[in-house]
Image: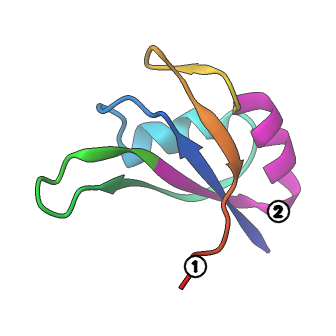
Amino acid sequence: MAKTLYVGNLPWSTTDTSLADAFREYGIVISSRIITDKETGRSRGFGFVEVEDADAEKMISAMNGTDLGGRQIVVNEAKPRQG
């Protein structure tokens, strides 16, 4: 089973790959994606990382509040979409 983590306050320069690489140090990353604005294609400053269930809590503890590219990121378990 996998869990999806929300990652907020990302630097605009963050890519899917660099986001995955930051988390890979703490466990298995299945996928990652940066959310972009549909019109401009620019990062919206947040993304999601899909990780192995067993690694999720360890990753949240290790990464929440850490510095990534000069910004203090927010990491928590993603909530299901509403609506």
Question: Within the magenta stretch, is there residue 56?
Answer: yes
Q: Which residue corresponds to the image point at 78% horizontal and 30% vertical from the top-left? A: 62
Note whether 82 is above or below 17 in the view shown. Answer: below
- Secondary structure beneath disc 1? loop
Residue at (82%, 34%) from the top-left corner?
Answer: 61
Q: Which residue is mark 2?
A: 53
Mark 2 and mark 1: span between their CA atoms? 22 Å
Q: Amino acid at mark 1?
A: Gln
Q: Is residue 19 above or below residue 40?
A: above
Secondary structure of residue under mark 2? helix
In the picture, the quarter occupied by the N terminus is: bottom right
Magenta-span inclusion, residue 59: yes
Where's residue 34, x and y in %?
39, 51
Q: Farthest residue in the bottom direction?
A: 83
Of badges 2 and 1, the one in the foreground is 1
How many numbered discs? 2
Amino acid found under the numbered disc labelled 2: Asp
Q: Nearer the viewer, residue 56 or 21?
A: 56
Q: Position of residue 16 (x, y in %)?
A: 40, 48
Question: Which class describes the residues within 10 Å of circle 2: few (<14), some (14-19), or many (20+)?
Answer: some
In magenta, the rendered stretch is: 47-63
Question: What colour scheme has been applied to the protein in the rendered image?
Answer: rainbow
64 left or right, relative to 44:
right
Residue 82, label in figure? 1
